[in-house]
Each structure stands twice: as structure tokens, then as C-alpha cells.
Amino acid sequence: MNVPLAPPGDHPDLVPLAELSARGIHAPSVQSLARDQSPFARPTPAWTRHLAPGVVLTARPIDLSDGCLTNAYTLTVDLDRALCRPVSSPRGFHLRRLVTGPAVAVVSGAFAYISDDPDYQPAEPCLDLAVRNHHAASLPTATKPALLLHHGRPVVRTLTATGTLIVAGHPHTWTGSKQPPPHPAPPGHLTVYGAANCHIRYHDDPRTGFRRDVDPATNTTPSDPAVLDCTVVPTPAGARITAVHPGGGADLFAGAFVLRSHRPWPDHLLPGAHVNVTAIDAFATADVASALSLGPSAADAAAGLTAAWDQSLGTSPFRPDARYARTLLALNGRHLILTVLDGAPLAPTFQGVTVQETAELCEQASHDPAAVFHLDGGQTSKIAYRHGREPASAVGSLHYLRWPRHEHEPFHWQGLDGRRLHSALQITPTEESR
């Protein structure tokens, strides 16, 4: 007997299960994926898709040790024929929404603050450096590699967390709070704090396994009677000091960053004072259209040199034996290579790759692990793209579920859109290529 299908509204899992099935992933229900993600543990068919002149996306399965596997999705961009632009937004976005106009692909970007507490979030969620339209939205607290769009061309550099800025017309030097300060410090020298100084804590949760947050009471700059902390907030008229805190104790999330001055602090550090960041390391901000801090290189992650990232990421994704999905970036001459090594945390043989396996896979692909850098990984790892006249699709982290916001809400499959992100790398063909 033929039984007519009920309307999708009566069975909300039908549409997502059909989407998964079309990709060769067969699950009994969406709710079951909150406990068992083994349906995603399947090798991808190898394929190649030419998204635009100079922009190629490939897929291939990779066997790992101990019977594990990953799927590698690699986007190769000829920078003579296409542009890579770091983009970021405090409000956030889903990757597929950026595959618009001439853009043909978007890759998950820099590490950002992630918490399950919607009521206490940072004003600037990007961790360390973020530059938008030649203006520094957030400053680095530690020496880190970064991707910069410099004079219209992507550049990867390790940037020292130092620079210059102007407050109310007065020049200052600055250093990130995780950097050794200059000795002796120049008059008026400032120290930068930001969301990257936060400490993530974890709690058990009966439905989702755990919840992440920070303690607002302790999420502040250190107390010191000899300092003045200035909260800096972007405004339509430019960044300005909105509050001052004698003795420290400024909320790390209240503004884009915090500037700390030591006694005797200048009289012009007052609420309303305009702040203009003029240089980051040796780069003038006027020459940098956009920029984002990167994660550690594959070599440094394998060697455990990840202290600059660990405290603000909570449980470190760079632990030696931990398998995670990874997103990697390599800039090799005129070619930019962006790779997602896929994985699902609740699929025992498909949880991703270790940092050591990542370095080995880089070497097998003839890339120096010291010149390959991590972008945000885990459930953030994703490439969204448009192929021909097809609607925008995505690869990586297809297991992603939107967690319930209250006790009786079900899990929702959100694999094509994934997590709401705060930064990405957008790939657009040049006008000549189009």
C-alpha cells in the first residue's frame, strides 16, 4: 500500500535527512546525531570542481592510523586571477550567505570567542587582530601570525604585538598584554587587553555534554593601583574611549579592546577621546585593508608551541592526542591553498586529525609545516562555494547541529550553514577573470 508522506511541518527531520541522504549520509533521525555521528564516517568520492578561473575545489579521502579516516577538501586559488579577502563582523554570519555576487567560495576564518551563554558576549568576538576597512577593530595581545590584505595582495606575516596609535591627537606606543613590555618603556606607553585574555570554563550538561562560558566577575583586567584602564569602543565617528577604570578591573568584553596606562597617566585619557591605531608591528594600518590573526603553524602545533592561543580557546584543540577537524592555510607564491580536514566529534573513526598527523599530511603534500597555519577548526571548519548555476553548497562539518535553547526544544540540523561565524576568507575572481 502506498502511504502518502506527511507534510514536512509534521516531520521536521524529513528535509534535513533527505539533504544528508543526497550526500550519501544516512541517519535514522536528526536527534540521533546528537549522540552518534558515525553516519558521517564515510570516505568522500574523489572529485574536482572548477568554481571560476583560477579557483579549484577538490575532495579526496585520507586513511589515518588506527583505522581512522578524514576527508580533505582543498580550495586552490591563483592570486593572479582571484582575490582572497579577510572579512569579519561582530554580529556574525553564516558562510553560505557570503557566497553572493561575484564571490565563488568562502572559508571559515580566524579563531573567535565561543560561549554557550547568550547574555554575556564580547563586543568584539575576534581574538587578537582584526582589521576592517583600514581600521583596527581589535589589537593583538601576543605575537601571532596573521593574514593581511596589504596593498590589495594577501600577505602572511608573524606580527609582534606592538605598534603605535594616537589618542586625542597625542601619539603613543603600545604592546600586547602577553608580550614583554619594552624596557625602559617610552613615556605614555600603553598595554593592550582584549577578549583574547579571557579564560573559558566548562560545565557538564545532561543534553549537550558540556556548556562553555566565562565568569563575568573575573573576566577583567588585573587590578593595580598604579594603572588606568581605558575601554575603547568603535563608533560611527571612529573608535573612542567610553570609560576609564583607575586601578584596573575593566570588563574585557565591554569594548573592542582596553588600553592600560601606568602612573603618571596622561590627562587626555578621558571618556570621549578619539583613538586611531596607526601601526601594527611594522605595518601602517592605512596600507592594510583587512587582516585577521591566524592560528599556530602546523609545525608549532605539533611541537606544542600554542600558549598564545590556549587560554582563550578553553580546552586546547592542539593537545597531542586530540583529533579535531582542521582548517589550514598556506600561501605559496601566487597560490593560496585552503584545506579542511573533516571530522565529527561523535564519530569514533572520523573525529578529525591530530596535530602530528596534520604536520605529516602537510609534508606529504610537499608543504613546509612551518608555513601552513591553522584557521578556526573543529565544528567551525567549512568551505561554502558555488559551482556553476547550482545553489551555494558546503563541505566540512556537515554533522553540525544547533543546540537546544530550552529543555523541550529538539536539535536542529544546520550542516550546510554551520556555526554562525565572525570571520571568513572570501574568494572573488578578478574582473579580468570574470
Image (cartoon, rainbow, N blue to C red):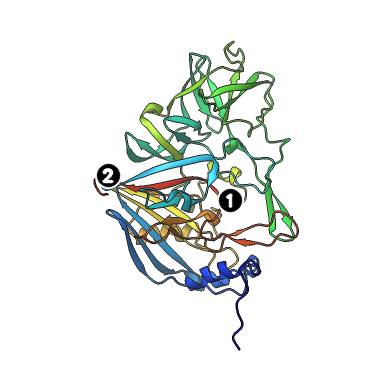
Q: Callout 2, which amino acid?
A: Glu
Q: Report, in whole angstroms, how far the alpha carbon at label 1 lies from the one at label 2.
A: 41 Å
Q: Which residue is mark 1?
A: 316
**Mark closer to the chain start, 1 or 2:** 1
> Looking at the picture, does residue 408 appear above or below residue 276?
below
Q: Is residue 162 visible?
A: yes
Mark 1 surroundings: few (<14), some (14-19) or many (≥20) residues within 10 A:
some
Which residue is painted at 45% across and 48% down in the image?
98
- The circle on residue 431 is 2
> Looking at the picture, does residue 382 appear above or below residue 182?
below
Helix, strand or loop status at disc 2: loop
Which residue is painted at 47% across and 50% down in the image?
97
- Check the picture and name the quadrant holding the N terminus: bottom right
Observer-side mark, 1 or 2, equals 2
Q: Position of residue 34 (x, y in %)?
A: 64, 65
Q: Position of residue 365 (x, y in %)?
A: 34, 60
